[in-house]
Each structure stands twice: as structure tokens, then as C-alpha cells.
Amino acid sequence: MRIVVGQGSCGIATGAKKTASELERLIKEKDLNIQVGTTGCVGTCYLEPIVDIYDDDNNLTRYVKVQPEDVEKIMESHFSCELGKDSSHCITRADEEVIEKQKRVVLRNCGVIDPENIDEYINAGGYKAIEKVFKEMTPEDVIEVMKVSGLRGRGGAGFPTWFKWNAARQNNAKTRYTVCNADEGDPGAFMDRSVLEGDPHSLIEGMMISGFAMGANEGVIYCRAEYPLAIHRLEKAIEQAREKGYLGKNILGSGFDFDLRIKAGAGAFVCGEETALIASLEGERGMPRLKPPFPASKGFWQLPTNINNVETLANVPWIIANGGEAFGSMGTEKSKGTKVFALAGKIKKGGLVEVPMGMTLEEIIFDIGGGIKNDKKFKAVQMGGPSGGCIPAELKDTPVDYENIGRIGAIVGSGGMIVMDEDTCMVDMARYFLDFTRKESCGKCNYCRLGTKRMLEILERITEGKGRDGDIELLEELASKVKDGSMCGLGQTAPNPVLTTIKYFRNEYEDHIYNHTCTAKSCKALFEFFITDNCTGCTVCARNCPVNCISGERKQLHVIDQTLCTKCGKCEEVCRFDAVKRR
């Protein structure tokens, strides 16, 4: 018997380390011959902390939302075979279906193996793909398998993976580099982080295969410094791989030399663009360069370089082991395989999902994600992060693939899905994302540096109730110039959230500008709190108000002084009688 506690960042944030410590204390106290192991995030972040108990036949019982104070009760229930009498922490059938409805390729080992134990990765079939490559394949064979698979870059652009590898291989230079872009910067995106924390060896093996295919003997993982747990587990995995002979000189007697190192990035969003990433690797400020030449011919230190993101490379061992046809049989004709998405925002079951390309937004958000929190009305989903666009509820039957999502004005991107409900102001949402890209602009291009700033100023004015006639048209004009005049993908896609919200929610812009109202009652300058006759005079709102702007006698109707109210929303949050409203 063994017990495993999910300790990805999401699990640790909800108390998994304390839960594991309490398990270890209780096991020691009762003198039980049980080990407490560690694994990464299985994807159901909304259920953390998760405790998995495996019996001697490897049958799994999963307990969810387990805090230290729950441990003894669960252990007693489990070992006394009275599980059915107390199932408050047992995973429900509906939650089990969240995983069962997926097709897990990239996430195949996440939440299953110990990421800090290479033997568990090997026992799960790890490093079999690179052994197959060494024994049975030439670099050209590997590239052909990748071509058959149809794998496209999962970092945002969706460029064919085999083509990039082949372009670098065909260069005559003696030294080539393979680089992993683990600089995941989209707000609400955490796919790469979870793979690094839960299955780092799949990335290492994917980079080895990439290096073999293109003739590179050195790989670099460019990981954002804000991912300390991911970096720690990567460092440990690289060290273990060297000890086992999977990295270094003459790997497994193949004659192929390959090693890896990690570069911690400073968290600049623009370094998600490959030439800016290369500049940062070289010790320069992360700023994009003109293309061509492309990195495949002149990249890191002006040598042929291939750059893929974590998810792309984590697919590679599975593809080599199972064949390109197996991967290509999933998904759609032009968007093959599976894709990992991070569900965040106003969704019931937030976390990671991996589904075949072509599944509709409705299936992902409602069938797997459980729908909208508090059963509110689904309004929109932002796909592709700040570079993507807002997709309205009426397009929820859109298949999620590169072609269909691009056709309606968004992008698949790295896989972030921020779900919004009826209380979300789409103008303010556009303002939020443009504020992000304006801050993250490297400043090299005038249109990006100044254009995003001017667009943001207009959006801020609109959300403050100071919009002017012609503002919508001015935003569209500026958006066009920023897209056309920017050098890299950051500036070229920065206006997308604005353009899509104008396209699908123009009425909200018009309400802000001409009627001085916020449809969602979200923009502080355009609404006020008031107390209705439902008030019982319990004084809870008055006692919780940080600026003491609520007055009234006990058991009498209370009033809000609008001249003092900061619209923090605390009164609405604490009222138990639904007496505080917005108007």
C-alpha cells in the first residue's frame, strides 16, 4: 500500500504540504508500513489538495480537498472499510468524468508518477522512445514520423514542428541548438508549468529526440524564474538523467552526445517571441529581431536553432513510441492530436484539460469544466491570452482548432481559456488585457509602444464614464495601425481583445459612451451600491465597511453615504439577506 499527495503549485497553495506532513506524522504514530509519496497536478486543480491511496493490487481510492484536520478521519474510515459511511472527501463520479472525458498525451504522467523519481518515469515507459530512435531510426526517419503526426507548435503560432526541425537540420553549420520555450507568460495559463512540475522527464526526452533529429548536441530550457518548483524539479530530473546515462557523452552507446542546461528568465512576456528569447539567452535585453533570417538558420549565437515550447516537446516521446499515425488519428484534418487547455475565471471546475483538437467550446466549458460558477449565464471566453480574442456565448459550438478559432478572431495560443459570466464587463476586460500588453511591450516599435498606450487611455476613459463620440472608430483605427506597424507578435496581436470585444459586444461600448452605464455593473464610475427593503438591520454591512459609510439603527433600514463609498463591494459580499444591490 502507498499514499501519494498531489504537490504541484496548485496543491501546495491549498495546503498539500501540511496535509502530507500530517499523513507522515499519523503513519509514524500508528507504526504503519506505508510511504507517503509525491506527484504533480492531475489537472483537477479545483479539488486540491488531493490524496491518492493505492492498495496492494494498485487499485486507487482518491480523496479530495483534504486538509490536515481531515487526515485522521479519512485514514480511520479507509482502513476500517467504512468508506461508504463517510464519503465527504471522496471524489464524486462527476469529478472522475472530468478526467475520463479527456485524451491524455502530454498529461499522461502528471498526477500519476513522482516527478522527482526517474525510475517511476522509466517504469511508465519513459526513455523507451529515445532508445527506439537510437536503435531503429535515422534523423530523417524521426522528422518523417513528426511530419506524419501533424504536430503543430503548441506555443501559439501552430507552425508544423517537423518543418522547423528539418530547416535547422539542413543548415551546414557544425553546431546547432535546440531550445525549449518555458517562458509561459499569458495571464491564466499554467499548462507548461504543470508539465514541468509533474513530468519533467517527458520534456527532457522530447528535447533529446529533437536534438537527434536536427543534429544538436546542446539544449537550453528557458524557464521563467517565477516557477521555482518547476526549475527545482527540472534540475533534479536533469541530474538523474545524467546519472542514468540518458544525458552526456555517447548516450546508451549510440555515439550521440547531448546535454541540457536551464536558463531562468526574468518574466518578460515579450520573451515568448523566439528572437527576443534568443536575445535574452545571449545576455541582452529581450527584444525581437527582424526576420528573416529565421532562428533555423541564424539563432542562438548566430547558429541554427530550433525553439519549441514545453507542450510541443512533451508530445514527442509519445509520438515516437506510438507512431505518427496514432497521433494524427486524433483531432481534425489540419489540427491533429490533442491540446492542453487551462480553464480559469468564472468556471466551476478550473484546472487543466487535454482533449482532441476539434472538440467544441461548449463541450470543454460545460461537459468537462462543469459550467459557470453559481450557475450564472455564460457570456464569453478569452482564448489565446492577451494575444487572443473574446469569443461570445453564441459561438460556443465552435470547434477548437487553429482554423476555426482563427476564423472568428481569436487564436488557440498556448491554451489559456478565461471564462466570463454575465457580471463581466467586456470593455473593462479589453482594458485589462491591453494594460498587460502595454506594460510588457519592449518599446522597440513606435506603434506598439505608443499605440497601445493611446488605446489604453481611450479604454480607461470609457470605463470611467468619460467616453466620447468617435472613440470606437478611433480604437479600430489605432488597432489597425498597431497590428500593421509592429515588428513582432506582441504588437501585432495586442489589439485582438479590443477588436473582438468591439465586434461582438459593441453595444456595451455604446452604453458606456452614450448612456454612461455599464451593462454588467462592473465599472466603478458607472454604478453605485444601495440597500433595499430586504434589509433587516443586522448591522453586518456597517461593521464590515472599511470607510464607515453605512449608517442605521439596529433592526432598521440602513443607508449608504454615496459621497464616502469607495465601491469596494464588501457590503454586497457580507450581506446574508440579498439586500445590497447595484444600480
Image: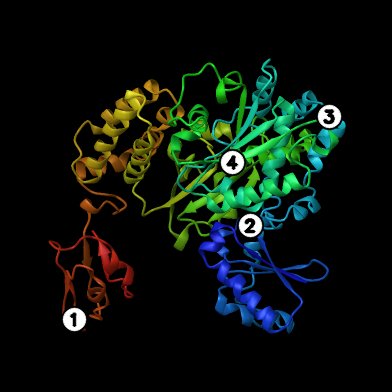
Q: Write down the residue under mark 1.
A: 556
Residue at left 23%, top 68%? 546
Instruction: Answer with mark 4 or mark 3, whichever residue precedes in sequence.
Output: 3
**Which mark is on residue 137?**
3
Give the mark toward the camera: 2 or 4: 4
- For label 2, the SS is loop
Q: Write down the residue under mark 4.
A: 262
Which three-letter amino acid code belongs to the residue tagged 3?
A: Met
Residue at left 56%, top 71%? 18
Label 1 to label 4: alpha-carbon separation: 64 Å
Asked whether the residues under the numbered discs 1 and 3 touch, taking CB atoms below 8 Å apart as contact, a structural biologist would say no
Instruction: Answer with mark 2 or mark 4, whichever residue precedes in sequence.
Output: 2
Which three-letter amino acid code belongs to the residue tagged 4?
A: Ile
How dense is the environment of label 4, judged by Cα within 10 Å: few (below 14), some, or many (20 and up)? some
Label 4 to label 3: alpha-carbon separation: 28 Å
220 or 214: nearer the viewer: 220
Q: Write down the residue under mark 2.
A: 40
